[in-house]
Image: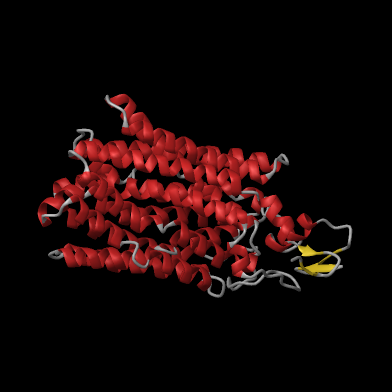
Amino acid sequence: MVVVAGRAYTGQATGREAHKAMTEVSPPAMDTDAAPGQARAWIVVGMLCLFMLINFADRAVLGLAAVPIMRELGLSHTEFGLIGASFFTFFSLSAVIGGFLVNRVATKWVLATLALIWSLCQLPMLLSVTVTALVVNRVVLGFGEGPAYPVALHATYKWFRSEHRAVPTSFIAVGALAGNGIVAPVIVAIIAAWSWQSAFGLLGVAGLVWCTAWLMVAREGPLVPDGGGAGPVGNAEVRLSYRRLLKCRTIVGVEIAGFVAYWLLTVAVVWLPAFLTRGFGYTLVQAGWIMMLVSLAQIVILPGVSSLSDGLKRRGIASRIACGWVACTSTFVAGLLVILLSQSAGSVPIIVCTIIAFSLCNVMFVLGPVLVAEVTPVTQRGATLGMVNAITTLAGPFAPAAMGLVVDAGAGTSDGIRNALLLAGVLVVLGALAGFFLINPEADRTRHSPDPRLGTLSA
């Protein structure tokens, strides 16, 4: 007999049952669908949606102000791409640090600290700005934003069981992606009416307002002990080495597919407005509206795909298909559409490919963390999500600089932009195919489950 989180499993218990108990530990009497705190759960999700909206707006403002910044500071495409890449100097490192931190510290305080860092980083941009000041802003902002998404998801998963996580995850992801699109026309209007520095300052103020509201309403979810640190609810704890977790096929598959999806996301944040204006002939205002259409499509697509995934899982469909194949199919189609975009002419195909491609690629950021949580012990979830996010977002430092180099190497700006998009599309297609091959949470759960005969983790 093996005991996992206070529950006993005999020799007849399956590895899947034991591992499910290991990764989904919760109070036995707790039913999150009918819990009195369920309204509070969705308040937390709403606040975290706004949290990620401000997070990505802080990141996207650089791309939306790309043309005036390059003109004012005399930057080439390569130089601007390197400034965009500086955001990721400590981004992955801080994601790992934040992930381990929330294994021991309440997510309420970690999230408030992150928002405070962003805000204090943006406000000095209201002063006279040099290239050095802009690089420092990006580096510090990246350090503060690195842990944001995995910590927000860890906080959310304290309120929802596995089969109900995709939808709240999608709302948080929509908040992140809306920061890159829905607020784009507002940011562009501020830049046009006042200056790009004013847009930075406004986002700093928005972060301070959110931080105040969060501290008033936030609390830790009931699926971990009160106090919000780490540790399962139960009498025993089953852990895997992080080396073993990071070698898990599902986690490796999520990392590869997530890496290429994040490549596209970084292109959207740093380069897409400039690509639309300089490569396809749109004005800055028109590019802002196209970015908004991308975000509106995400608001429909991400919750829709997430509801489909959760529904398939509740009907007994294997998570490999319900989560893995759905996510990889979305990423694969996104890559094909970016390739098509690189060869397109005419406004309709350009806008359609842009909207659908840069919406579908983000499905991986919703279903990928759900897959990681399925194969990770609950007490190690925060750190594992942080490490996976750190590896996935390594695309961030490379994508802006690589795309800038390809653009500058082209025969002309327009040809260079099309070549850069073609490269991105091929990369995304290859990463999605790797995800199809690797992601299989059911097999990984069986492989890593406690051995019911020996009472230990199976080798």
Q: Residue at x 25, y 50 (%)?
A: 405
Placement of the N terminus among the 4 image quadrants: bottom right
Q: How is the image coloured?
A: secondary structure
Q: Nearer the viewer, residue 24 or 192?
A: 24
Compared to 304, does 381 lie above or below? below
Quadrant of the image occupied by residue 242? bottom right
Placement of the C terminus among the 4 image quadrants: bottom right
Q: Nearer the viewer, residue 313 or 261?
A: 261
Percent position (x, y) of residue 220? Answer: 57, 66
Residue 61 visible: yes
Q: Residue at x 74, y 61 (%)?
A: 449
Compared across the picture, whether 124 is left or right of 391 comes to left
Residue 26 visible: no
Compared across the picture, whether 234 is left or right of 346 comes to right
Percent position (x, y) of residue 188? Answer: 22, 45
Percent position (x, y) of residue 94? Answer: 42, 69
Compared to 343, does 389 lie above or below? below
Q: How many marks?
A: 0
Q: Residue at x 28, y 46 (%)?
A: 271
Percent position (x, y) of residue 140? Answer: 31, 68
Q: Nearer the viewer, residue 175 or 23?
A: 23
Quadrant of the image occupied by residue 231? bottom right
Q: Residue at x 25, y 49 (%)?
A: 404
Compared across the picture, whether 415 is left or right of 369 comes to left
